[in-house]
Amino acid sequence: MLALLFFSPVVATANLIEVFVRCDPAGQAITAGLAVFSIIAWTIMLQKHYELKRLGSYNHRFEAQLRDQKSLLDLPESFRDKRVIPYADLFADAVEAYWRAAAIGKEKGVDSTRARLEHAENALQRALSRQTLRYESSMIFLATIVTGAPFLGMLGTVWGVMVAFSDVAVQDSATIKTLAPGVSAALLTTIAGLVVAIPSVFGYNFLLGKSKQLVTELENFASSLADRIELESK
C-alpha cells in the first residue's frame, strides 16, 4: 500500500512528461508559458502576503507610539522620518503641510487655523491615495493571470484537438488508439491553465480582502489623525 502511494505521483509525473513531449510546438509553448505564469503568480502572492502582514504590524506599532503622545504637532522630526510605514507617511505629510501653511500664512500676514487644517487634510488625502496604491500594487497583474490562464489553456486545447484531427484525417483509418494521444496532449494545456488559475484566484481573493481591510484601517487612522490635529490647533 505504501509503495503504491509512493509510486503513484511518480507514475503520474512520468505520464505528464510523456504527454508534454507528444504536444506540438504550440502546445508545448503554451504549457511552458503557463508554468512560468504559475511561478510568477506564487511569487507575487507570497511576497504580497508578507508585505501586507509586515506593513500592518508596522502601522499598529506606530499608532501605539502616537497614542502615548500628548501633542502630535510638536513631536520631533524622528517621527516623520519613517516613511516606509504607511501611518508614518500620513502623519509626516499632515504635520509638514500644517506647519508649511503656518509659515506661509505668517509671511503674508493671513495666518489662520482654518487654512492650516485645510492644508493638513489635503495632504492626508494625497498620502492616503498614495498608500492605497501601494497596498494594491501587483494585484492587477495577479488578476490578469487569474483571468487569462484558463483562456490560454483552452486555446492550447482547441489548437491541439484541431491538429490531432488533422493528423487523423490524412490516415487511411481513424481509431481511438490513433486519436487518443493527440487529444490527451491537447488536454494538457487545459490542466495547466487550471493549475495556474485555481490557486491564483484563491490567493487573489484573500489578498484583495486583506488589502481592503488595511485601506479601511488607513482611512480610520487618517480621520483620527485629522481630529487630533484639529483639537490641538484650537
Image (tube, rainbow, N blue to C red):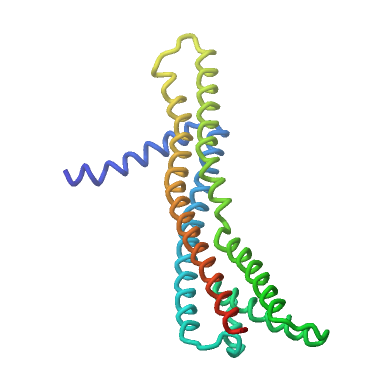
How far across and down, in percent of the image, does residue 122 sit?
68, 70
Quarter of the rendering containing residue 223: bottom right
Q: How many marks?
A: 0
Residue placed furthest toward the left:
1
Q: Residue at x 60, y 89 (%)?
A: 74
Q: Quadrant of residue 1?
A: top left
Residue furthest to the right: 108
Q: Is residue 51 above or below residue 81?
A: above
Rendered position, 56 above or below 32:
below
Q: Foreground: 109 or 47?
A: 109
Residue at left 44%, top 73%? 57
The residue shown at (57%, 33%) is 26
Looking at the image, residue 104 sits to the left or right of residue 37; the answer is: right
Residue 136 position in % (x across, y down): 56, 58
Q: Quadrant of the C terminus?
A: bottom right
State the residue in front, 72 or 1: 72
- Foreground pick, 55 / 154: 55
Q: Residue at x 75, y 83 (%)?
A: 111
145 shown above or below 62:
above
Query: Which x, y percent locates residue 194?
Result: 44, 39
Q: Would residue 188 be found to the left or right of residue 125 on screen?
A: left
Q: Residue furthest top?
A: 172
